[in-house]
Amino acid sequence: MNIADVIADARKIVIKIGSNTLAKADGTINTAFMDEFAFQCADLTAKSKQLVLVSSGAQVAGMSTLNRWTRKKDIHYRQALCAIGQVELMHQWRTAFFKHGLHIGQLLFTKEDFTDSYRTLNMRNTLFTLVDEGVVPVINENDSICVEEIRIGDNDNLSALTAELWAADLLILFSDIDGVYTANPKENPNAQLIKTVTDINDLKKHISIGNTNAFGTGGMETKLQAAEKATRCGIPMILANGARPRILEKLASGDAEATLFCV
């Protein structure tokens, strides 16, 4: 099965947007991308798809809003920056989706929320209610209060946990790379894109994972962790480059390259 078929067959889709996708080269938030992405989401909802968005970018948005804290490394400043940025991030998503007649709802999670059965039930009920009413949930980790003990740590794994919680049909991760390569394509011109993955453990034996990206908290390792979580639950996953123009639309039409993790 190819990517276009997987998207066509999926009704409930979780989409994760990475910080590198949301950030421009200068580190500020990319509102043009958000507008284009919201347009593509509206097109999918018009085709009876239900969408949940897991959006990184609170810190990026915070730096766009209050750049005097950009170089501060103290955890309290970073968390405060996320508190400021989360407001700006949601404002930009609300503006982008509202242009296409869609409303959004914000949900902020921590690792503890997924281990408490009562919270999990409430999270699931809220997700289903929002989606059933045509509202697009926008999820992020609650970075302003998280410490190491309750952190998920990256939105790749958060999106996989969300896909499992919602019993999604498909998980799509958008990052700054076209998919999984045999090596880092930014360092090795001979790296080859792996278009289909059926065995993640075997894949790890034959690729070089590399380091964390520039603005985000995850790298290829967290994306493979997300793929393991999703496929273990019977949910296929697509890893694609969110910076490509109309990437969601092109994946659905079969006109974009990416990596498909099969179940």
Image: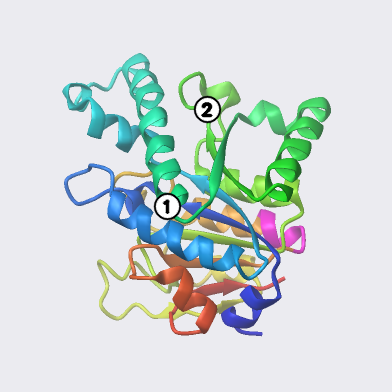
Of callouts 2 and 1, the N-terminal one: 1
Q: Is residue 207 visible?
A: no
Question: In percent of the image, x 35 and y 23: which residue is there?
Answer: 84
- The overriding secondary structure of the stretch rendered in magenta is helix
Res. 151 mark: none
Q: Which residue occupies the foreground of this view, 249 or 112?
A: 249
Disc 2 and disc 1: Cα gap in Å?
Answer: 27 Å
- The quarter of the picture where residue 255 lies is bottom left
Disc 1 crowd, CA 10 A, few/some/many (<14, 14-19, 20+): few
Q: Amino acid at mark 1?
A: Lys
Residue at 33% from the left image edge and 63% from the top image edge: 243
Left or right: 71, with 78 as reference point: left
Kindly identify the residue that appears in the image at 72 percent across and 70 percent down.
Answer: 263
- Image spot of residue 158 (x, y percent): 59, 43
Q: State which mark lies toward you, 2 or 1.
A: 1
Residue 100 x %, y %? 47, 56
Magenta stretch bounds: 229-234
Instruction: Note whether residue 121 is visible.
Output: yes
| Residue at numbered disc 2 | 142
The image quarter in which residue 110 lies? top right
- Residue occupied by mark 1: 99
The verdict on residue 148 being magenta is no
- Compared with 80, 138 (above or below) is below
Element type at marker 1?
A: loop
**Color style of the picture:** rainbow
Q: Is residue 80 left or right of residue 259?
A: left
| Residue 30 pos. (x, y %) | 28, 49
Q: Nearer the viewer, residue 65 or 240?
A: 65
Q: Amino acid at mark 2?
A: Asn
Percent across and percent down for residue 96 are 40, 49
